[in-house]
Structures are given as structure tokens and as C-alpha cells.
Amino acid sequence: MYYHQGKVFKKMIRQLPRTLQTHVYDVLIIGGGCNGTGVARDLALRGASVLLLDESDPNKATHHNSHLGHGGLRYLPHLEWGLVREARRELRYLLTIMPHLVRPLSMVLPVYKGDAHPYLLIKCGLILYDWFSGKSTLPHHQSLYIEDLLGNSQKGIPGKVPGLRNQGDLIGGFQYYDTQIVYPERLCIENLRDALEQHSERQPVQTLSHTKVTRIDEYLDYVHITFQDQLALKPRSYPVKAKYVVNATGHSVDKLLQVTHSPYNVKVPQMGPTKGTHIMIHNVLGLKHTIYTAAVDGRPFFVIPYPIPDHETTVSPYLLIGTTDDKQWESEYPTSQEIEYLLQSTQQNFPETDLSESDIFWAYSGFRPLPASKKQAGSVTRKHIIRHVGNSRIFHVIGGKLTTYRSLAEEVSDKVIAALKQEPHWDFLSRIKHAGHCITAQRPLPGGRGINDIFAFKDQEIPKAVEQYDISPEIVAELINRYGACYTEVVDLTFPCPADPQCGPHLKTLLPQQAGNPPIIEAQVLHSLRYEGAETIMDVMTESLKMDLLPGSGLEALDVVASLVNSEKSFSSEREKTQQIQAYRDFIHHNLQWQQTTNS
């Protein structure tokens, strides 16, 4: 990416920055998930020169999660009060700096006789949970009676959880609030965008996706990194130097340690990742609230309406159900055993619903970057650890949660800035923008600038955009959901431009107009390629537009997307285009291969 006249642009031809050979970066960050991009943003805002390398597309690591920004109610019984306090505080900040991406989410927690945690203990925990929220805009919890949960037709009381299991052991429940981050990938994109806006000749801030680090050598005054450009036609290695390195590769921290040569070598293993699998079905239960209950083995279990609609009277089209928490896993993709576990757990909690594998239109797995531990998966701490040995120039990020990514980034940046201040030739005072202090808790992300209330913003912008751009209100609403205040950048790409045949009109929707399908338009493909770092068909389909999570996995749009990618990136040959299309089809096949196992 490069920065010019107030906007972040993507070069049409893959060219590596000249500064790679001429500049010693203050910090090189490896890993483009929420932690890596959060650190890049924080350090760039403090005046550091930054290079971020990611093996795939930045934001991919956040793609396969539960899409929840939560305070960690279930961590209270483990006495991780500090983590819960931190998470609840961070939710306040997330709602402020990215109101278009983070929405309040109503959670219903039913309580049964014989539960591991009795009713009064949960009540006390929720009081503490609310207290940790401080001045949050999220409502406090409330107690629910059985008829609140199940409804009472004689009194005309609709149930919050129709079809919920009740075998005479249901006591009542609670309603409290966390948040849903429908597009966590965009959180990473906007972190990078804010970081790249700090780029200058004196303070280079750059990112390179699809780069694999093959060797790290730590010396007394700097760190030498060697990486490969995985988009190049012929494999080639490139060197780059940095004063400090941040290893933010998530569950792959140990892999990077194995190619690191340092007098302060950190021993492996550091990581003990667990696998979490989710399934997606149509909202056959008619749920309007997220249900937090127990799976067949007593583990925490969520049934989440997805995505959250703008109005409480509207029912979300899909349900996101999860998750597993396995230390011992044989495949990085969902397995038939995991699918069966999730179906049985759903059936146990909603016995009147007859679900089967045929009801599942998508399944995916992700990995929690947990520290190595002999404890059971559910008992391993979710606190992050910043591993730094002696006077080493390498910082290793272990663990972390989507909800607390910003505070993790602040902690890492504090340590790196403190180290940089000790450098004899670091012109801190002349380059620093905010005296070395963190401002990420108050500074909105680009899409959140100027938005105090996302619903009021929509009410104001949708009629104006419909009249000004002759575009449907449904498309405008979806663009605001994804891009916030930056939605007009996409709209601008829908207009024909006489000087550029590739510039509009690109208003055509990519998916069939059926219930649940968001109105994704061609201009969004171009926007992701030009302004958001997408390089391949896979990048666009998954991280940028999230079409793999929809019924049909976006296969109907694959050919159109491929043509648009080709128009922007110019495939080297028809063979490369065919290979990228097949790569996406293989990805879909692997995530659904449990179907063949089940049916065999």
C-alpha cells in the first residue's frame, strides 16, 4: 500500500517499497490479525516507522471466530476478574471508536436446577459484570421469569426464547448485554488504514501481505529479517532491517521462533492453541436474542442470531452456533464429530427443533492463540502475555482476545516506545505526534469518524444518498454497516468515468436477491483491491466481502469477482486466474468435507 493526498492506495502492480533496502524501520510487525494491526496503528500514531508483514491477507486471522465482543462472563468463576474488568472497559472504547462495526447484543442466559453455577451465584456475577462496565452505554442485566423465557399465550406475553428446553427444571434466567462484531475483518482493515495515514517520507508506514518470513537474525543494534514474496512468479527472498520486531502471529508464534536466531532465544513451545468450530444455519428457531447456555458436555454454548438487524422487530436471517474447544485436533477444518457435537447441543437446548446436517449451509474452524498449559482447554487463561527476554529486540505476543486487542496493542507499544527512547539515534522528539502517549481509545477508526449514533447516522445518510446517487436504500444501509462514514468511497466507484474505462458503473449486485443475502455490489470488489490491500480472489471473497459465510458460499459471484480482480491486478496468464478460482473452490470444499465423511 501507499499513501497519497489523503487516501491509502494499492499499487496496481505488485511492487515492493524501495525503503525495504534503504530504511531501518523502527518496528517490524509480523502478523496481520487484530493484534498485529492494532500494534501497527498504535505505534504509527506515536511516530514510529512501521512495516507489517503477513503471510496471507491482513485480517484473515479474525475471520473464523464467534464474531462476539464480550466481557468474558464465563471467566468470573475462574477468578480472572482483571481480565473481565479489562474486557468490559474495552467494550466501552470499541463502541465509541467503531460504532459502525460494534453493536450491542442481547444475551439470554437460562438457568436450570442442578446447573454448575446456581442462580444466586450467577446473579452476583452479573452484578459484578455490570459494575466492571463503568459508564458503558450497554444496559445492565435484568432477571427473567420462566414466562419471560417461554412466553404465556393466555397473558399475551411473547417468549424471548421460543422452543427452549423445559422439563420442569427451568428456574428462570437473565438478560444482559455484550456486543457483536459482524465484520471483525474490517476492524483490521481500518486499523491498518489509520496506521498508513501516518506514512511520510521521514516516517514510512507500510504493509506487505502474502509474505512469508523465513529467517530472523538478531544482532546487537538491529534485527535482520528475510522474507519471501508469495505472489511473485518466481520465489525470491528479500532482506529488511528493523530496530525491533513484534511477533504477533497468533497460534503460529512457535513456528516463527523456530526460524529465529537470537542470543535471547525463547524456548518452544509457547503456544497451546485450541480449535473452535462453528456452524451456520437459517434462523429456523426465530431467535432475536443470543442464547448462552450449556453444551452436551457442560461447556459454554452459544446460539447467536447473525447478523444483528437494525430494528428489534426484525429477525436475523441466520444463526451462528458454537463452539468447540479442543486441544487435540487432527484437522484444521471442521470434522463430522465436531458437527455432531454442535447439532446434539442445539437439539438438547431446543428439543422441538429437528436439526440435521442438511440444515447446515456453512461450517468453519479457527484457533485460539492460548499459551501452552497442562490445564483443560476451558480453564486455560485468556489473558495475553508479552514475552520479552532480557535486552532482546524481539517481543512475542502470546494469547489475546478480539475484545481486548486495543489494550494489548497499547501494552506492546508502551514497551517498544520505551525501548526506542533508549536508542542513541532515534529522533523521538522531532517525529513524535502525541508525546509517546496512546490515543487509540479516543481516536475513532476511519469508518467511525463523525458517527456518535450509527442509527441516527443511517437515518440521515440513507435518504441523502438515495437522492444524490440514485442508489437503493438497502445498498446504502449495507455499505454503512461495513464502511461507516467511508461508504461514499464505494459509492464513488459506481459512477462512470470517461477517463478510466475501469471506473464504473459497478452498481450491479453480485448475489441473487433472496432472503438473507446482503446487497453486495461490484464496486465493493474494486474498493477492496484498490484501497484495502486485497490481492487475490480468495482475499476478496473471504476477508473483504465475507461471502463464504453466506448460503452458497458466494460461488454464484465467483466468475464476476475473478473478472474484476483480473481487471485490477492483471493475472499473468489465464492459468493463474483458473488457479485462483480453484483455490477458492478448494477452500469451500475443505470446510464442508465433513459432509462426505458423514454421508459415507
Image: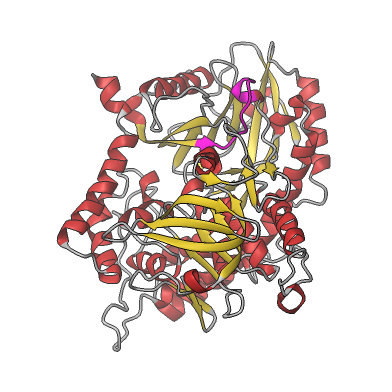
| Name of the residue lying farthest toward the left | 574
Residue pictured at 71% horizontal, 33% vertical: 73
Q: Percent from the top left, x then y, of residue 249?
A: 53, 46
Q: Nearer the viewer, residue 263 or 421?
A: 263
Q: Percent from the top left, x then y, of residue 89?
A: 76, 48
Region rendered in magenta: 367-378
Magenta stretch, main secondary structure, is loop
Q: Is residue 63 magenta?
A: no
| Name of the residue lying farthest toward the bottom | 499
Q: Quadrant of residue 159?
A: top right
Residue pictured at 82% horizontal, 48% vertical: 134
Q: Is residue 155 above or below residue 340?
A: below
Q: Nearer the viewer, residue 104 or 9?
A: 9
> Can I make out residue 464 in this image?
yes
Q: Is residue 376 magenta?
A: yes
Q: Is residue 336 above or below residue 394?
A: above
Q: Percent from the top left, x then y, of residue 383?
A: 70, 37
Q: Nearer the viewer, residue 477 or 443?
A: 443
Q: Across the whole image, how many numbered discs are drawn on residues?
A: 0
> Can I make out residue 453 in this image?
no
Left or right of residue 357, residue 95 in this image: right
Q: Is residue 428 above or below residue 397?
A: below
Q: How is the image coloured?
A: secondary structure
Residue pictured at 75% horizontal, 25% vertical: 77
Q: Is residue 497 above or below residue 267?
A: below
Q: Quadrant of residue 236?
A: bottom left
The C terminus is located in which quarter?
top left
Q: Percent from the top left, x then y, of residue 496?
A: 31, 82
